[in-house]
Image (tube, rainbow, N blue to C red):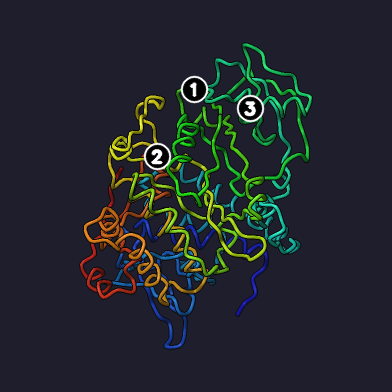
Amino acid sequence: MTILSRHNRASFETTKRVLAEIVNEGLVHAKLEITTSEGPQILCLLSTLNPEGESLVKVAIKPGTIIEMRDDRVVSVVRPGSLQPPVILADTNHEEFDPGTLFKVLSTSFGDVASGTVLDEIVRELRNSAANQEKWLEIGQDQPLLNLKDRSAHWELTAEDIPGMLKPTLAFISVPRTDLRVTGHFEQELQPLLERLEIPGITSDRVIVPCLSQQLSSIHQRFPNATVLKLIEDCADAQASMRTLTLRPDGPVQSELLEKLLPNDLWGFREVAGVTGSQEDFNDARHLSCILRDSLETRARENDETLIIAAALAQKPSGDGLLFELVLPPLVQYGIGLEGHGQNLVARVCRRTGQIKGFAVRDFGGVRMHVPTLRNHGVRFDSLPPGAATLTDDLQNVWSKVHHSLLQNHVGLLLGALGLENHGGWAITLEILSTVLASEKGSPGETLFEYFTKDTMPFKCFLRMRMESKYRDYIEREVPNSLLMDTPRWESLLDTYRPSLHAT
């Protein structure tokens, strides 16, 4: 087996993700070939314009991986983790690791989906991702092992962080009040921090907003009247979700609602206040956003618990079955769909025993709430704007989002990391789901279980959405439901499967 250089390892981490996404979204025609009886399977990516022609790109598949084919094309979801080097450009028969080059070659199959300008932007973004990967691989080799005595912030600082984001420089800027939308008691909540850092206080016509110093050039382009009051170095630790946040006015209202309705062992990182740009153009407004969340560190310490981002535990089974028991009842009873994936879920781990005691959920922008169900429970939505992205009258819209984030995404990642996806992992998942949801005949939980076990489920096409500049609207492709992989229905549903795209 060839040992890859750090540069090629980093490039392949991005490459395997983009290749899997391109296949899963149906942007290319994909099929399998076996070179020798003992050799690895090869995933061949062909143009949809000429599916009988020569392959554009070929990539090896890890031994033991099962990828389903029907009518000479791949029909099951391809996991990034199932791919391995080499990646071959078929026209030259040369090995290629650069995700930008591979995307360019494959884009000849779907160039009609996006303009050349957008495709070039994506090429640059992919190469930038690979460069970041290479840097964090360098940093990761010197990272210490963590234990249950470490603070939750230390678990957030994975090897994926680059130096400027490990301990970012904070900028405090003064912005005209007319350029902002303020939600909750943002200024009052921030005032103690401003006093501690000796930053001038509130005025009637301006608001002080903290941001990352790396954002300043982008902010000044869109908020020309903003002025920098102070730069503070080495005063904070970054979390895993290092990205620009977009404030929705739902946050504080949702926090109060979720606090009342979530199970006792499912805590919420309460969003108490926030600020964002007042521009009508979402793409401009989002470049200056700040959400103030409650810290749960003190509450966890009082319980002798450590808070650990769930993604950090992807390779260590806990033996505890609390996730479905805590996340799914609010969906059944109240129509509240939590975005239960590894970055938004924080595990509450007992420091003494190492057992998972519960979870905490954060980033309420991904929550979906079914308005009619909540109204039946006496909830009023007067303080939320019409058309809020988190509210819907379509219950299946909520269910679909939970299936995507919790099952396709989070559980699928865990099963892949544990080597269980093709070895009974989905059967275990299905059994636990049945216990949590379908124990009572004719119950709302059984109805949800029947939805989760449909033959096909929507797969969110984030690459298509990026190419078509969609942010709030989804493009989805129906794919065979992986949850059924270990059931007698699996073979027959593959035989009748027909891919389709739809927008929501």
Q: Which residue is mark 1?
A: 279
Earlier-in-chain disc, 2 versus 3 = 3
Q: State whether residue 117 appears in this view.
A: no
Q: Position of residue 111 (x, y in %)?
A: 38, 49
Q: Secondary structure at mark 2?
A: loop
| Residue assigned mark 3 | 189
The reply to whether callout 1 and callout 2 are in contact (CB within 8 Å) is no
Q: Tell me which amino acid carries mark 2.
A: Lys
Name the residue at 47% across, 60% down: 322
Name the quadrant containing residue 190: top right
Whether 422 is drawn above or below 463: the answer is below
Q: Position of residue 103 (x, y in %)?
A: 48, 55
Q: Nearer the viewer, residue 502 or 400?
A: 400
Task: Specify the amino acid type for callout 3.
Answer: Glu
Q: Secondary structure at mark 3?
A: helix
The mark closer to the camera, 2 or 3, is 3
**Residue 198 in view in this figure:** yes
Q: Which mark is residue 332?
A: none
Across and down, in percent, residue 499 comes to 26, 59
| Label 3 Cα neighbours within 10 Å, binned few <14 / some 14-19 / many ≥20 | some
